[in-house]
Image (cartoon, helix red, strand yellow):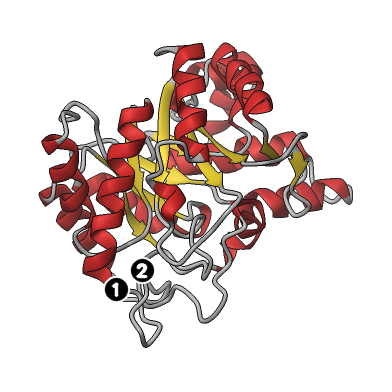
Amino acid sequence: MNAQYPVARPRRLRRTAAMRRMVAGTRLHPAELILPMFVKEGIAEPQPVGSMPGVVQHTRESLRKAAHEAAEAGVGGIILFGIPAHKDARGSGADDPDGIVQVALRDLASDLGDALVLMTDTCLDEYTDHGHCGLLTADGEVDNDATLERYASAAVAQAAAGSRMIAPSGMMDGQVGAIRAALDANGFAEVPILAYAAKYASGFYGPFRDAAECAPQFGDRSAYQQDPAGPVGEALREVRLDLAEGADAVMVKPALAYLDILRQVRDTVEVPVAAYQVSGEYAMVEAAAANGWIDRERVIMESLIAIRRAGADMILTYWATEVARGLS
Protein backbone atom coordinates (compact mmCIF):
# COMPACT_ATOMS: atom_id res chain seq x y z
CA MET A 1 0.00 0.00 0.00
CA ASN A 2 1.09 3.60 -0.59
CA ALA A 3 1.97 5.75 2.38
CA GLN A 4 -0.47 8.45 3.43
CA TYR A 5 0.01 11.95 4.80
CA PRO A 6 1.98 12.94 6.85
CA VAL A 7 4.50 10.32 5.69
CA ALA A 8 3.59 10.85 2.03
CA ARG A 9 4.32 14.40 0.89
CA PRO A 10 4.21 14.82 -2.93
CA ARG A 11 5.48 18.39 -2.57
CA ARG A 12 8.95 17.02 -1.76
CA LEU A 13 9.51 16.45 -5.48
CA ARG A 14 8.35 19.96 -6.42
CA ARG A 15 10.38 22.13 -4.07
CA THR A 16 13.06 23.41 -6.46
CA ALA A 17 13.39 24.02 -10.18
CA ALA A 18 16.22 21.50 -10.38
CA MET A 19 14.08 18.86 -8.66
CA ARG A 20 11.15 19.53 -10.97
CA ARG A 21 13.39 19.26 -14.04
CA MET A 22 14.86 15.99 -12.82
CA VAL A 23 11.52 14.25 -12.31
CA ALA A 24 9.65 15.81 -15.27
CA GLY A 25 7.63 13.19 -17.08
CA THR A 26 7.09 15.19 -20.27
CA ARG A 27 9.84 16.96 -22.19
CA LEU A 28 9.98 18.93 -25.41
CA HIS A 29 12.87 18.78 -27.86
CA PRO A 30 13.39 21.17 -30.79
CA ALA A 31 13.56 18.29 -33.26
CA GLU A 32 9.96 17.41 -32.42
CA LEU A 33 8.71 20.79 -33.65
CA ILE A 34 7.56 21.52 -37.21
CA LEU A 35 7.14 25.08 -38.47
CA PRO A 36 4.27 25.84 -40.89
CA MET A 37 5.33 28.52 -43.41
CA PHE A 38 3.49 30.43 -46.13
CA VAL A 39 5.13 31.54 -49.37
CA LYS A 40 3.31 33.81 -51.80
CA GLU A 41 3.97 34.38 -55.46
CA GLY A 42 4.41 37.89 -56.81
CA ILE A 43 5.12 39.92 -53.68
CA ALA A 44 8.24 42.03 -53.10
CA GLU A 45 8.13 42.10 -49.29
CA PRO A 46 6.81 39.73 -46.63
CA GLN A 47 3.14 40.41 -45.93
CA PRO A 48 2.02 40.28 -42.26
CA VAL A 49 -1.03 38.13 -41.53
CA GLY A 50 -3.33 40.40 -39.55
CA SER A 51 -5.05 37.63 -37.59
CA MET A 52 -1.74 35.91 -36.74
CA PRO A 53 0.67 38.44 -35.21
CA GLY A 54 4.25 37.49 -36.02
CA VAL A 55 3.31 35.28 -38.99
CA VAL A 56 3.86 36.44 -42.57
CA GLN A 57 3.30 35.42 -46.15
CA HIS A 58 6.90 35.05 -47.26
CA THR A 59 8.69 36.02 -50.42
CA ARG A 60 11.11 33.43 -51.74
CA GLU A 61 14.01 35.30 -50.16
CA SER A 62 12.41 35.90 -46.78
CA LEU A 63 11.35 32.24 -46.71
CA ARG A 64 14.97 31.18 -47.20
CA LYS A 65 16.08 33.40 -44.32
CA ALA A 66 13.35 32.17 -41.97
CA ALA A 67 14.04 28.56 -42.90
CA HIS A 68 17.74 29.06 -42.10
CA GLU A 69 16.77 30.47 -38.72
CA ALA A 70 14.54 27.47 -38.02
CA ALA A 71 17.33 25.05 -38.94
CA GLU A 72 19.83 26.91 -36.76
CA ALA A 73 17.40 26.72 -33.83
CA GLY A 74 17.15 22.95 -34.23
CA VAL A 75 13.58 22.78 -35.53
CA GLY A 76 12.87 19.33 -36.91
CA GLY A 77 11.03 20.31 -40.04
CA ILE A 78 9.08 22.94 -41.94
CA ILE A 79 5.86 22.44 -43.87
CA LEU A 80 5.15 24.71 -46.82
CA PHE A 81 1.84 26.22 -47.93
CA GLY A 82 1.78 28.18 -51.18
CA ILE A 83 -0.31 31.09 -52.42
CA PRO A 84 -0.12 31.35 -56.22
CA ALA A 85 -0.66 34.54 -58.21
CA HIS A 86 -3.30 32.80 -60.32
CA LYS A 87 -6.01 30.41 -59.17
CA ASP A 88 -8.38 28.32 -61.24
CA ALA A 89 -11.03 25.64 -60.80
CA ARG A 90 -8.58 22.72 -60.96
CA GLY A 91 -5.82 24.23 -58.84
CA SER A 92 -3.25 24.18 -61.61
CA GLY A 93 -0.55 25.70 -59.45
CA ALA A 94 -0.50 22.68 -57.18
CA ASP A 95 1.46 20.52 -59.62
CA ASP A 96 3.05 23.15 -61.85
CA PRO A 97 6.83 22.54 -61.81
CA ASP A 98 7.22 26.31 -61.75
CA GLY A 99 4.51 26.82 -59.14
CA ILE A 100 5.41 28.78 -56.04
CA VAL A 101 5.81 25.80 -53.70
CA GLN A 102 7.92 23.84 -56.16
CA VAL A 103 10.19 26.83 -56.81
CA ALA A 104 10.52 27.49 -53.08
CA LEU A 105 11.29 23.83 -52.42
CA ARG A 106 14.16 23.91 -54.88
CA ASP A 107 15.51 27.01 -53.12
CA LEU A 108 15.34 25.39 -49.72
CA ALA A 109 16.65 22.01 -50.82
CA SER A 110 19.67 23.76 -52.31
CA ASP A 111 20.20 25.92 -49.23
CA LEU A 112 19.55 23.47 -46.42
CA GLY A 113 20.08 19.96 -47.70
CA ASP A 114 19.00 17.68 -44.87
CA ALA A 115 19.48 20.18 -42.05
CA LEU A 116 15.77 19.77 -41.39
CA VAL A 117 12.89 17.90 -43.04
CA LEU A 118 11.25 19.78 -45.92
CA MET A 119 7.56 18.90 -45.89
CA THR A 120 4.69 19.98 -48.09
CA ASP A 121 0.97 20.26 -47.58
CA THR A 122 -0.72 18.43 -50.43
CA CYS A 123 -4.16 19.86 -51.06
CA LEU A 124 -5.91 22.11 -53.58
CA ASP A 125 -7.63 24.75 -51.47
CA GLU A 126 -4.76 27.26 -51.71
CA TYR A 127 -4.78 26.88 -55.51
CA THR A 128 -8.48 26.78 -56.45
CA ASP A 129 -10.54 29.86 -57.21
CA HIS A 130 -13.48 28.35 -55.30
CA GLY A 131 -11.42 27.59 -52.18
CA HIS A 132 -12.44 23.96 -51.77
CA CYS A 133 -9.99 21.11 -51.34
CA GLY A 134 -10.88 19.30 -54.54
CA LEU A 135 -12.40 19.44 -58.00
CA LEU A 136 -16.08 20.27 -58.17
CA THR A 137 -18.92 18.54 -59.97
CA ALA A 138 -21.43 20.54 -62.01
CA ASP A 139 -23.61 20.61 -58.89
CA GLY A 140 -20.86 22.14 -56.76
CA GLU A 141 -19.98 18.99 -54.82
CA VAL A 142 -16.36 18.01 -54.25
CA ASP A 143 -15.60 15.09 -56.58
CA ASN A 144 -13.62 12.72 -54.38
CA ASP A 145 -12.20 10.36 -56.99
CA ALA A 146 -11.34 13.00 -59.59
CA THR A 147 -9.55 14.95 -56.85
CA LEU A 148 -7.31 11.97 -56.06
CA GLU A 149 -5.66 12.31 -59.46
CA ARG A 150 -4.82 15.95 -58.71
CA TYR A 151 -3.39 15.09 -55.31
CA ALA A 152 -1.24 12.36 -56.81
CA SER A 153 0.11 14.74 -59.45
CA ALA A 154 0.82 17.45 -56.87
CA ALA A 155 2.64 15.01 -54.59
CA VAL A 156 4.91 13.87 -57.42
CA ALA A 157 5.68 17.50 -58.37
CA GLN A 158 6.53 18.30 -54.76
CA ALA A 159 8.76 15.26 -54.36
CA ALA A 160 10.54 16.08 -57.61
CA ALA A 161 11.19 19.62 -56.33
CA GLY A 162 12.71 18.39 -53.07
CA SER A 163 9.94 17.64 -50.58
CA ARG A 164 11.13 14.99 -48.14
CA MET A 165 7.68 14.27 -46.70
CA ILE A 166 4.25 14.58 -48.29
CA ALA A 167 1.37 15.62 -46.03
CA PRO A 168 -2.06 15.29 -47.70
CA SER A 169 -4.63 17.38 -45.82
CA GLY A 170 -7.73 17.31 -48.00
CA MET A 171 -9.56 14.44 -46.23
CA MET A 172 -10.54 12.73 -49.48
CA ASP A 173 -11.25 9.02 -49.18
CA GLY A 174 -8.34 7.07 -50.67
CA GLN A 175 -5.93 10.02 -50.86
CA VAL A 176 -3.04 8.26 -49.15
CA GLY A 177 -3.27 5.23 -51.41
CA ALA A 178 -3.42 7.35 -54.55
CA ILE A 179 -0.40 9.39 -53.49
CA ARG A 180 1.59 6.34 -52.41
CA ALA A 181 0.99 4.65 -55.75
CA ALA A 182 1.98 7.77 -57.68
CA LEU A 183 5.14 8.36 -55.66
CA ASP A 184 6.21 4.74 -56.06
CA ALA A 185 5.51 4.73 -59.79
CA ASN A 186 7.59 7.87 -60.33
CA GLY A 187 10.73 6.89 -58.47
CA PHE A 188 9.90 8.36 -55.05
CA ALA A 189 9.29 5.20 -53.07
CA GLU A 190 11.56 6.52 -50.31
CA VAL A 191 9.43 9.64 -49.65
CA PRO A 192 7.18 9.12 -46.61
CA ILE A 193 3.59 10.27 -46.16
CA LEU A 194 2.32 12.07 -43.07
CA ALA A 195 -1.44 11.65 -43.30
CA TYR A 196 -3.82 14.25 -41.93
CA ALA A 197 -5.79 11.26 -40.71
CA ALA A 198 -8.07 12.88 -38.13
CA LYS A 199 -8.80 16.40 -39.35
CA TYR A 200 -11.89 18.06 -37.99
CA ALA A 201 -14.20 20.67 -39.52
CA SER A 202 -13.09 23.18 -36.93
CA GLY A 203 -13.74 26.81 -36.13
CA PHE A 204 -10.08 27.15 -35.16
CA TYR A 205 -8.91 27.43 -38.79
CA GLY A 206 -10.05 30.97 -39.50
CA PRO A 207 -6.69 32.78 -39.27
CA PHE A 208 -5.03 30.12 -41.45
CA ARG A 209 -7.51 30.87 -44.20
CA ASP A 210 -6.39 34.49 -44.06
CA ALA A 211 -2.75 33.41 -44.32
CA ALA A 212 -3.28 30.91 -47.14
CA GLU A 213 -6.06 32.89 -48.84
CA CYS A 214 -8.13 29.74 -49.10
CA ALA A 215 -11.52 30.40 -47.53
CA PRO A 216 -14.29 28.53 -49.42
CA GLN A 217 -16.23 30.85 -51.72
CA PHE A 218 -19.43 28.96 -50.88
CA GLY A 219 -20.47 26.39 -48.32
CA ASP A 220 -17.93 24.84 -45.99
CA ARG A 221 -15.82 21.70 -45.65
CA SER A 222 -18.07 19.72 -43.35
CA ALA A 223 -18.82 17.15 -46.05
CA TYR A 224 -15.22 15.95 -46.08
CA GLN A 225 -13.60 16.96 -42.80
CA GLN A 226 -14.69 15.15 -39.64
CA ASP A 227 -17.58 16.36 -37.49
CA PRO A 228 -16.38 17.52 -34.04
CA ALA A 229 -19.39 15.71 -32.56
CA GLY A 230 -19.03 12.66 -34.80
CA PRO A 231 -18.87 9.01 -33.71
CA VAL A 232 -16.17 8.26 -31.15
CA GLY A 233 -14.52 5.64 -33.34
CA GLU A 234 -14.49 7.69 -36.55
CA ALA A 235 -11.01 9.10 -36.01
CA LEU A 236 -9.52 5.68 -35.38
CA ARG A 237 -11.24 4.32 -38.47
CA GLU A 238 -9.72 7.12 -40.56
CA VAL A 239 -6.30 6.42 -39.06
CA ARG A 240 -6.51 2.70 -39.78
CA LEU A 241 -7.59 3.32 -43.36
CA ASP A 242 -4.67 5.70 -43.96
CA LEU A 243 -2.20 3.23 -42.49
CA ALA A 244 -3.62 0.45 -44.65
CA GLU A 245 -3.07 2.70 -47.70
CA GLY A 246 0.58 3.26 -46.83
CA ALA A 247 0.81 6.22 -44.44
CA ASP A 248 4.11 6.33 -42.54
CA ALA A 249 2.85 8.70 -39.83
CA VAL A 250 -0.52 10.20 -38.91
CA MET A 251 -1.78 13.55 -37.67
CA VAL A 252 -4.56 14.89 -35.48
CA LYS A 253 -5.76 18.43 -36.28
CA PRO A 254 -6.52 20.67 -34.38
CA ALA A 255 -4.53 19.79 -31.28
CA LEU A 256 -5.73 21.37 -28.05
CA ALA A 257 -9.47 20.77 -28.46
CA TYR A 258 -8.82 17.16 -29.51
CA LEU A 259 -6.32 15.90 -26.93
CA ASP A 260 -8.64 12.98 -26.18
CA ILE A 261 -8.50 11.93 -29.85
CA LEU A 262 -4.73 12.36 -29.87
CA ARG A 263 -4.42 10.07 -26.86
CA GLN A 264 -6.62 7.41 -28.47
CA VAL A 265 -4.58 7.50 -31.67
CA ARG A 266 -1.26 7.33 -29.79
CA ASP A 267 -2.49 4.30 -27.83
CA THR A 268 -3.66 2.55 -31.00
CA VAL A 269 -0.91 2.91 -33.58
CA GLU A 270 2.78 2.02 -33.82
CA VAL A 271 3.84 4.86 -36.10
CA PRO A 272 4.78 8.46 -35.25
CA VAL A 273 1.82 10.67 -34.37
CA ALA A 274 1.76 14.41 -35.11
CA ALA A 275 -0.59 17.10 -33.83
CA TYR A 276 -1.18 20.50 -35.42
CA GLN A 277 -1.45 23.45 -33.04
CA VAL A 278 -3.54 25.41 -35.49
CA SER A 279 -3.90 29.09 -36.31
CA GLY A 280 -6.83 29.72 -34.00
CA GLU A 281 -4.93 28.32 -31.04
CA TYR A 282 -2.00 30.57 -31.91
CA ALA A 283 -4.15 33.66 -32.46
CA MET A 284 -6.03 33.31 -29.18
CA VAL A 285 -2.84 33.14 -27.15
CA GLU A 286 -1.26 36.07 -28.99
CA ALA A 287 -4.40 38.20 -28.64
CA ALA A 288 -4.80 37.48 -24.93
CA ALA A 289 -1.11 38.13 -24.31
CA ALA A 290 -1.25 41.42 -26.23
CA ASN A 291 -4.01 42.53 -23.86
CA GLY A 292 -1.97 41.55 -20.82
CA TRP A 293 -4.43 38.86 -19.79
CA ILE A 294 -1.99 35.93 -19.77
CA ASP A 295 1.72 35.21 -19.48
CA ARG A 296 2.51 34.56 -23.16
CA GLU A 297 5.66 32.42 -22.85
CA ARG A 298 4.23 30.37 -20.00
CA VAL A 299 1.00 29.62 -21.86
CA ILE A 300 2.85 28.70 -25.06
CA MET A 301 4.97 26.15 -23.22
CA GLU A 302 2.02 24.84 -21.20
CA SER A 303 -0.01 24.25 -24.35
CA LEU A 304 2.85 22.44 -26.08
CA ILE A 305 3.52 20.28 -23.02
CA ALA A 306 -0.16 19.33 -22.97
CA ILE A 307 -0.01 18.24 -26.61
CA ARG A 308 3.20 16.30 -26.01
CA ARG A 309 1.79 14.67 -22.88
CA ALA A 310 -1.33 13.58 -24.76
CA GLY A 311 0.86 11.58 -27.12
CA ALA A 312 2.21 13.72 -29.95
CA ASP A 313 5.66 12.73 -31.20
CA MET A 314 5.74 15.79 -33.49
CA ILE A 315 3.99 19.13 -33.08
CA LEU A 316 3.25 21.56 -35.90
CA THR A 317 3.32 25.00 -34.31
CA TYR A 318 3.83 28.57 -35.49
CA TRP A 319 6.03 29.09 -32.45
CA ALA A 320 8.47 26.35 -33.50
CA THR A 321 11.55 28.53 -34.03
CA GLU A 322 10.95 30.67 -30.95
CA VAL A 323 10.38 27.67 -28.71
CA ALA A 324 13.30 25.73 -30.19
CA ARG A 325 15.62 28.61 -29.39
CA GLY A 326 14.36 28.68 -25.83
CA LEU A 327 14.80 24.94 -25.40
CA SER A 328 18.32 25.08 -26.81
The structure residue drawn at horizontal position 44% and vertical position 18%, both measured from the top left corner, is 109
Disc 2 crowd rating (10 Å Cα; few below 14, some 14-19, many 20+) is many
**Image position, residue 316 (x, y; %):** 49, 39
Q: CA distance from mark 1 to mark 2?
A: 6 Å
Left or right of 193? Residue 138 is: right
Compared with residue 186, is residue 133 higher up or lower down, i.e. above or below?
below
Disc 1 crowd rating (10 Å Cα; few below 14, some 14-19, many 20+) is some
Query: Which residue is identified by label 1?
Result: 143
Give amino acid for label 2: Leu
**Image position, residue 262 (x, y; %):** 36, 51
Camera-side residue of 40 and 251: 40
Q: Is residue 43 visible?
A: yes
Query: Which residue is identified by label 2?
Result: 135
Camera-side residue of 285 and 34: 34
Give amino acid for label 1: Asp
Q: Is residue 33 visible?
A: no
First reached walking from the N terminus: tag 1 or tag 2: 2
User: In which quadrant of the rendered image does the C terminus lie?
Assistant: top right
Residues marked 1 and 2 touching at CB (< 8 Å): yes
Numbered mark located on residue 203 in the image: none
The structure residue drawn at horizontal position 16% and vertical position 55%, both measured from the top left corner, is 240
**Image position, residue 254 (x, y; %):** 48, 55
The structure residue drawn at horizontal position 54% and vertical position 16%, both measured from the top left corner, is 71
Outermost residue to the right? 291
